[in-house]
Amino acid sequence: MIVFPKAKINLGLRITGRRPDGYHDIETVFYPVSLCDALEFVADSKEPGKDTINLSGSEIPGRMEDNIVLRAVRRLRETYPVPYLKIHLHKNIPSGAGLGGGSSDAAFILRAVNRAFSLALSSDDLKAIASGLGSDCSFFIDCQPAFASGRGEILTPVNAVLDNYYGVLVNPGISVSTREAYENCKPSKPENSLAELIKNPVSEWKNTIINDFEKTVIVTHPQIKDIKQTLYNCGAIYSSMSGSGSTVYGIFSKRPLIPSDLRKFVIFEGSLSTISDPVK
């Protein structure tokens, strides 16, 4: 079976508090985009007792055996009858880019294994497993626009507010540590919840939909600010860094003309319309 794990962008990200468990409470809107990895697997009878994974495409830091896809399969196998798998993951979504690529890979293999081996797990069942793998992992089970709170695992569906818009994602090739990004931010309660602000027209987002990470990440990576301004100069209605960076996206009413010096860093451009793909 082959599946195509999608990336996400964050429409705003507010850090609202620090929790006793060391995590942070946040508010954000996760929005899926069509930039995707390719993930293929088959039951492996030649390597009894272990899963194997082959990687291609963008580099993934860390040890192979710690890959989140393998951890997701092992977590599922703790409770359900899942054969050992031979897996190939081709990475198009860059790591450390604020796009949730690893979490999406994990969630999509949970969905696919559930379907391939008729485990009959519901969306909620899969989300419960996914939440133990990453704070944003649960979102990718349904992979539909959602307001996220808590650590990012408490999800409330929102309307597909960008269905008629065009998106451009720019990644300057910088990997930003999520841990360091959080350590450099001071939590504060926003006056207005993102759950309400996101209902306003996109043309009103520029001064109201804020990513708290931008201020500190731009200090060490000023090119992020330059990319954002260039996207506005190209006609973006709204532009922001996604997650803890370093990807910056622009939302446009139509396909823009991107200057050549920025074009080489574009990793995705296209419609921001969403397609439903429910868990079966």
Image (cartoon, helix red, strand yellow):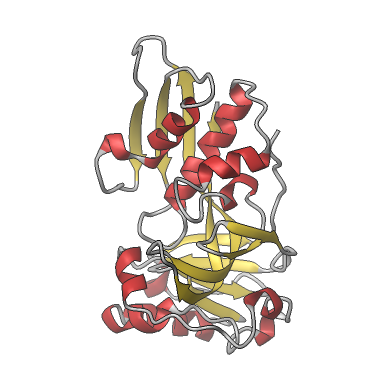
What residue sits 59% from the left and 44% below the top? Answer: 127
Q: How many marks?
A: 0
Question: What is the residue that sits farthest to the left in this orientation?
Answer: 63
Regarding residue 4, the answer to whether it shows in the image is no
Name the spot of residue 20 as percent of width and height, x first: 41, 66
Residue 116 falls in image quadrant: top right
Image height of 106 relative to 29, above or below: above
Image height of 280 relative to 44, above or below: below
Regarding residue 203, the answer to whether it shows in the image is yes
- 64 relative to 232 in the view: left or right: left
Residue 247 falls in image quadrant: bottom left
Residue 145 falls in image quadrant: bottom right
What residue sits 37% from the left and 74% below the top? Answer: 261
Question: What is the residue that sits farthest to the front in this orientation?
Answer: 20
Name the spot of residue 94 as percent of width and height, x first: 38, 54
What residue sits 30% from the left and 84% below the top? Answer: 219
Q: Nearer the viewer, residue 158 or 93?
A: 158
Q: Nearer the viewer, residue 203 or 211?
A: 211
Image height of 64 relative to 179, above or below: above
Q: Quadrant of the image for the N terminus?
A: top right
Name the spot of residue 143 as percent of width and height, x first: 62, 50
Image height of 35 relative to 169, above or below: above
What residue sits 69% from the left and 43% below the top? Answer: 277
Q: Quadrant of the image for the C terminus?
A: top right
Name the spot of residue 272 as percent of width and height, x first: 64, 62
